Amino acid sequence: MFGCIPLRRVSVNRCYDLNLHFRLCAHRFQFLAIESVYFPPDKAGNVLRGALLATLEPGDPAPLRPSGLADPPPPFVLRAAHLNGRRFEPGESFAFDLHIFDLRAPLVDRFARVCAEWESTGLGPRRGRVQLLRSAGTGSKIAIDLSDVNPASNCSVYFRTPTTLKGTPTPDGIPFGILFARVRDRIATLSSLYGEGPPVIDFGAIATRAALVRTVHSDLRRHNVDRLSSRTGAVHGIGGVTGSVDYEGDLTEFLPWLRAAFWTGIGRHTVWGNGVIEVVTR
């Protein structure tokens, strides 16, 4: 079994008495470098993305392939930002995390098979060979209760990896109403496609209350990152904002959703590690 994050139950009940749970399984893939492996700054997730796609076979299922705007979001995200700019020499080990939202499909076994191929195909710009140290296991099951009550009137949201949100008017600030709308839609979509069904909430009413939460301080920085498509030769922007925003208001019903978004990511390029947020209450 992969060594991962222990079982956690994060607890909004306000306008509804339903038990709304968002569930996922967190896995850790650990490797031993056989040859030198390098992850360029800001592009560890993209390196893993390229290696995964290069190793896929024609019969591999669509969830392991990148999705377009018209496609449903894949049922997983990678977490590899800690590898950015790092080099691992032969004999050194490293790991990345995988969060899976479809608990009905054996996706972790498929990932393990693909990752095992890197012992011959290699990883990174120079295709350094690596050995998968651990075989697929059950991982850590996580259940987040979206209907629990934990009163709060202020919080800070940290954007740990580059984040780009639809509807944000400027890169200098992110209104809470827009932030929560993207969080709500992301979790509702994943739950509808891969979980226990969409959360039964009044989307309009909760959006109205979210719009009442105020921004009291914003410390965001634009993080520009480009990637070159090896298939088309086109350059694509995969950057966004990082930093933090402080909010005040009645945040009680929103906090569990924000905590769930830590696991799912929000915005663009979440599958490869963008859009990681963390909420802290004071």
Image: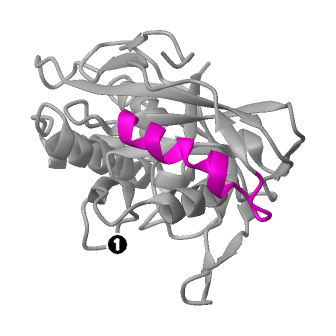
- Image position, residue 75 (x, y; %): 32, 46
Residue to which mark 1 is pinned: 68
Q: Is residue 109 magenta?
A: yes
Q: Residue furthest front?
A: 120
Q: Is residue 99 depicted above or below 52 in this figure?
A: above
Indicate left or right for 144 with 159 as reference: left
Task: Provide the major secondary structure of the magenta segment.
Answer: helix
Q: Residue at x 28, y 34 (%)?
A: 106
Along the line of sight, the residue nearer the viewer: 73 or 55 = 55
- Image position, residue 108 (x, y; %): 39, 34
Q: Quadrant of residue 259?
A: top left
Report the magenta residues as a range: 108-128
Residue type at tag 1: Gly
Q: Residue at x 12, y 23 (%)?
A: 16
Residue 211 appears in the figure = no
Residue 85 appears in the figure = yes
Q: Is residue 127 magenta?
A: yes
Indicate left or right for 179 with 171 as reference: left
- Image position, residue 92 (x, y; %): 84, 31
Q: Secondary structure at mark 1?
A: loop
Q: Residue at x 62, y 90 (%)?
A: 233
